[in-house]
Image: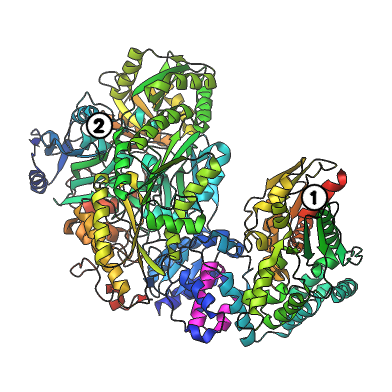
Amino acid sequence: MQHTIAVETLGPQGEAMVKAIETCVHCGFCLATCPTYRVLGEEMDSPRGRIFLMKEVLEGQLESRSALPYIDRCLGCLACVTSCPSGVEYGELLAPFRERAEQERSRSALEQTVRLLVKETLPYPGRFRLAVQSGRVGRWLRPWLPAELGALLDQLPERLPEAPALPEIYPAQGPRRARVALLAGCVQQVLAPQINWATLRVLARNGVETVIPRGQGCCGSLSLHIGEGEQARMLARQNLEHFPADVDAILTNAAGCGSGMHEYGLLFAGHPEEQAARAFGARVCDISVFLDELGLVPPAPLRRPLTAAYHDACHLAHAQRVSAPPRRLLGQIPNLRLVEIPDGELCCGSAGTYNLEQPELAQAIGELKARAILSTGAEAVILGNIGCMNQIQTHLKLAGQPLPLWHTVELLDQAYRAA
Amino acid sequence: MSAPTVVAPTSNQELQEAVCACSHLAVRGGGSKPGLSPEQPAPVTLDLRLLSGLLEYDPGEFTFTARAGTPLKTVAATLAEHGQYLPFDPPWVDQGATLGGTVAAGLSGSGRYRYGGVRDFLLGVRFVDGQGRLVRGGGKVVKNAAGFDLPKLLVGSLGRLGVLAEVTFKVFPQPEQYTTLRLPQPSLEAALATLATLARSSFDLEALEWVEEEGCPVLYLRQGGLAAPLAERQAALRSWLGGGEPLAAADEVRFWHTARELAWVPEGSLCAKVPLRLEQVAALDALLSAYGAPRRYSAGAAWAWVAWPAAAAELHRALSRLQLGGLLLKGQAPSPLLGIRSAPTLAERIKGVLDPFNRFPPLG
Amino acid sequence: MAQTALLDELARSIPPERLLRQPAQLVPYESDALTAFRSRPAAVLLAATQEEVVQAVRLCHREAIPFVARGSGTSLSGGSLPIQDGLVIALNRLNRILHLDPAQRIAVVEPGVINLAVSRAAAPYGLYYAPDPSSQQICTIGGNVAFNSGGAHCLKYGMTANHVLGLKVVLPDGEVVELGGASLEGVGPDWTGFFVGSEGLFGIALEITLRLLPKPALYRTVLAAYDSLEAAGDAVASIVAAGLLPGAMEIMDALAIEAAEAAVQAGYPRDAAALLIVELEGEPLQVEAEFAQLLQVVDRSHPRTLSVAKDDADRARIWKGRKSAFSAVGRLSPDYLVQDGVVPRSRLGAALAAIEQMSRRHALRVANVFHAGDGNLHPLILYDGRVDGELERAEALAGEILQLCIELGGSITGEHGVGVEKRQYMAALFAETDLAVMAELRRALDPGELANRGKMFPDGEAPALRAQGPHPLERLGLLSRE
């Protein structure tokens, strides 16, 4: 698309932003896979429309303020990137645009409160745990709370599972085939610590020694996606510092984290750590990709046959183009039958903290996903991201069918333990 | 009352002049569809049989352009020489039906079941409108999205919107061979049920005809294509249907010839085309049985050919009651359009543009 | 002002989130997939019911406000380009499949239903909807009807017009009429066929009765690479001469192959000058016999490589590459103009050679993708709008190509329609009388020329064969060019 943007004024991320706009030919193929277009049915809430709006703002033709509501509603799921025939790197336009917009906009007190809660709580497992416990106490306040804060409360679980501290090293079983470092995550450690433990066991079973570096922290993706570049960089620096160089790969079992860390290069564009950040990002690998490449020790059949729907997390399928490896891994479990979810390329509505910032839309999108899953007749849902897990669980429950949800590694773990 | 004058133009220009010279006129081609002529003969009849002949034909292009008065017989013979045919299988070839008359009547035959009807193969037209203008619509290539689809407008226009001068058609390669299965059905309901299941099967049928034989429905299913796999294909169809007897080659040819020529319609009988939806067949059939009217349901009962033994007015009333429309092809009536009408105001507006002086008979 | 009266009245029954009037809301609607033109409407109505569409059309008629209907806005000819200060009636929310009758083989749909959604709904019954424009995962039936859309598989079963049996439309003066029906046949003039392809000038379709076909039991898809476009074209001629009737025959040239591979990694042979895709479809026994014949014919045409799709996934991959080709050239060039000319099939070789010469003369690259089976070319003229004069050169080249198609006895548009883009060339394709009659027919239904005003017909002045300088509508201040 033609534009009159002065690239020089946009800083180090400017070239990537403008390239995305130039590459877009306005064909509209992206509308087919955009969850917000599906729900809202208007051009402003489609990738094509948002690119157009961002272009107008960057050209100075449109006030940022008037375009922001539509940009805010974007999930950042990147399904449009997968479906775009022209190769528009929409993410490289959206993230920097949001960061710029954050600096210029004024947010309401309510919005600021929510963002503060998110920023200062979610990335820190200790604080998050406390917040969850006290949040449960404050649940009686729900009817008087505005939608966003109410949504926050709704997401909190009834009970928090036991979370024993992770060891520094988890040794391989049998001859060692590889040595990796694991990002333990933030929210996941509180809400679903069993995923990390299953990860360690499955890796060990496959002859992999896992290092869980001390001093690591949240990967910064949440902050990045809400436009808090500075905080994202601060959190990322911790990981740049504390992850060892002498491992075969840096593994993550959360799609959101993997995708965020792959973007470290862009996050630090123009900063002294840019090279190191890019190099780090290149070493990050999703657990499913790693195991797929390594070659699984054949898993035994599950204790009982299972028909499960595999849900593609956006940040795995679209942001990282990982959709075959988890299916291949799961396909090796003898009595597990995988079914495809109709409109599988559509986000579940979790998208980082989307369900806190856009509760109504997240609700509508989550409902669509729940309905699609239930239409398959599957007995369970398998996926690769904690955010999706939370969101889909909420909406399956709302639909009256609380199916069990498991991470890919949890199924592998189940299979190995059944032997 | 003096007999109508007959004018036989031999060129487009003469056609234009003839139209301009008269205040009221009607058109005839091969005379195979007299029901389309107005009941009260117009003072002037344009006989288009001299406006005949192929103008362009490149077998490699699978298209041809011909003058409207060209008999179907001539066209079919020329196409056959190059292994091509008119896929919409127009009727009354032996009776001298012309291309123009076929388009004006909007008629297709049994074979339209495979690919489509006359409207789907007409690419371009040149016609003379009621103001004597020679107008071109469509084009000569198989894909064309430029301008309004005037060719489609003229399909079925019954000579009421304009006189066709030239037509361009798309053609297909002729199947190497045909074979037909005869499948008697115990009842009307059974026949309808068979049609419904066939509709969802993936058999490629050239034609699907429903004939009454001794008061019982009989389905005739025609398959066509390369000779080598044909017998096996028929066997597969037969097995899937759980019955049916193949017709001998000579019988096969004869059956479809009879179908095309509507030779089963009693001499002097009124003949009408009644488009149908499957759910309307039973009611129509009951009516036709009550009157003892011979009929055939063509192209999977997409329409009925009716040989009506009573007055046209009665058919008109009966069809209206059944919420059906019809076209009178043989016989006389105030208007060839029977039963319910479609889009009357639209018709009026279009007629107002193409025939403001009402030179052609009314489209009402 | 007339717009205010119209909008105020609409606002009485339409909530503000469905009657868009703010600049940030209108901006994304200013163009469709033809980005060379932009135009700002007074408002966009996101219609939720057929009644709202009818009400809007009636109000526009009363207030003499021009309007444009819009589906997904994927037109390549400016078909859904708004009229400046007019109303855009967005139909994408009218997306219900109202009725599907597998025995009758029809589907009755609202105009906002996505093309592919029809086939998906018909699939459980072993049926599908045949016309397959490359944008079918997002383009709407309403848009398909307005432009008589085609696609790769039109060779055997025809275009949209051949699959529309009935319509309920609202005419530009607000009258609602029903045309055709669920039967394959009708009597009297083919009003339905007349409406299809009228580019929105005859009003808006509210319900469309579509013909469904049985899904072919077997597909056989062949991919052949050639050292020249000519060789590929000759192969097509031989296939046709052999009496075969494939479901689709497509050719892509080296540039298009490069783009498609970058986008989709379909596995196309990279060093080929031309790629031919031929697909047979139908009953297994017949298709296998045809396939044997096809292989013989193709073999005799001396392709560099020849491969056959192994399974559904393979077949899907081959088509994904072809269908992404247009947009994929966005990777090769910042801008492009896609043309849609038709030439008689036998003149394809001559046309392509001529286009190559023109491309060299104008120093612009042209990628070629086309429906070889029916002579429908899609030259994609690659240019960089930021370079001085390149857009003008691209348009000059586009004009020459269209003129070439006319000279060779073809058409200026095979399936994208005339829209805004090719208005001037109508005068080269049709005589004055022809255009006059079409204009009269249009005015009989729309005396105020409110429906899609300014499209399809060349303006009143002496028709120029290509636009030099501002477009006539730009001179009138009705459009702006980016």
Location of residue C448 (image quadrant): bottom left
Q: Is residue B34 left or right of residue C96?
A: left
**Of helix, strand and loop, which one carries label 1?**
helix
Quadrant of the image for the C terminus of chain C? bottom left
Chain ID at mark 1: A
x and y percentages locating residue A351 in the rendered image? 69, 67
Asked if residue A419 is positioned above or below residue A125 in the image, the reply reads above
Q: Residue at x 54, y 41 (%)?
A: C312
Asked if residue B177 is positioned above or below residue C481 in the image, the reply reads above
**For discs 1 and 2, the disc positioned in front in the rendered view:** 1
Residue B35 is labelled as 2
Colouring method of the image: rainbow
x and y percentages locating residue C130 in the rendered image? 45, 43
- Residue A63 among magenta residues: yes
In this orientation, which residue lies closer to the viewer: A107 or C433?
A107
Residue B335 visible, this angle? no
Residue where numbered disc 1 is placed:
A412
Could you tell me how far apart the alpha carbons at marks 1 and 2 are, in whole angstroms? 78 Å
Amino acid marked by disc 1: Leu
Q: Residue at x 56, y 78 (%)?
A: A67
Main SS type for the magenta part?
helix
Chain ID at mark 2: B
x and y percentages locating residue A107 in the rendered image? 68, 84
Which span of residues is magenta-colored? A43-70
Asked if residue C360 is positioned above or below residue B96 in the image, the reply reads below
Location of residue C397 (image quadrant): bottom left
- Residue A61 among magenta residues: yes
